[in-house]
Each structure stands twice: as structure tokens, then as C-alpha cells.
Amino acid sequence: MEIKKIPLSQLEADPAGTLAECYESGDPWMIEMPDFRRLSLHPREPAEPVDLIDDLIANNAEFRDLVEKLKASGFKPFSFMDE
């Protein structure tokens, strides 16, 4: 697997084309930000379940703590289904 590095300007210039090219390559890409931070793009098949919240709860203790604090505070999530 090869990680291709591209500048943020390439993604900004042609977002759809750049994302399509990344997907078609099948390899992860690294986006180099102007302030030297990095972002990564990873192609995924549409049929793959993407359940970010469950992944965060299972693998991120800080996120679990935040969820517990919100529950304890009486926070009520927005629900568009009840409208």
C-alpha cells in the first residue's frame, strides 16, 4: 500500500475529482495542510457500514467520558423523527 501525499490546494481546486481519484486508487492519501498538520483520506466501499459513533464509544475513552457527562447533565439530543 502506498500513501500518496497531496497539498490541500489540490483538494480545494477539484474536490470531486481528487476524492474520486483517491477512491479509485484504493490507497490512503495524506493531505498536507499549510500549517504542517496532516489529514488522511481512506477509500471505503459504499457497502461497508460506517458507524462512527459506535466506533468512538468502543475505542475512545475520552468520547465515552463525554457521553457519560452528557447523560448525567440531562442533555436531550435533537430528534427530527418526532416532528
Image (cartoon, grey):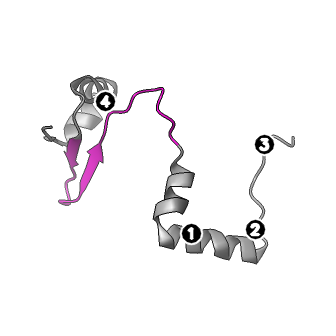
> In the image, which disc is placed on residue 80?
3
Q: At 19% across and 54% down in the image, what residue appears? A: 34
Residue 64, numbered circle = 1
Kindly identify which numbered label has been placed on residue 75: 2
C-alpha span from label 1 to label 4: 31 Å
31 is within the stretch colored magenta: yes
The answer to which of 37 and 51 lies nearer the viewer is 51
Tell me the CA gap for discs 4 and 3.
30 Å
User: Predominant secondary structure in magenta?
Assistant: loop
- Amino acid type at circle 3 is Phe
* Point 78% across, 62% down: residue: 76
Q: What residue type is labelled 4?
A: Leu
Q: What stretch is highlighted in magenta?
A: 29-50
Q: Residue 19 carries which label?
A: 4
Going from N to C along the chain, the mark reached first, 1 or 2, is: 1
| Mark before the other along the chain sequence, 1 or 4 | 4
* Image quarter hosting the C terminus: top right
Q: Which amino acid does label 2 sit on?
A: Phe
Badge 2 or badge 4: first in the primary sequence: 4
Mark 3 to mark 2: distance in Å?
16 Å
Q: Does the magenta stretch include residue 1?
A: no
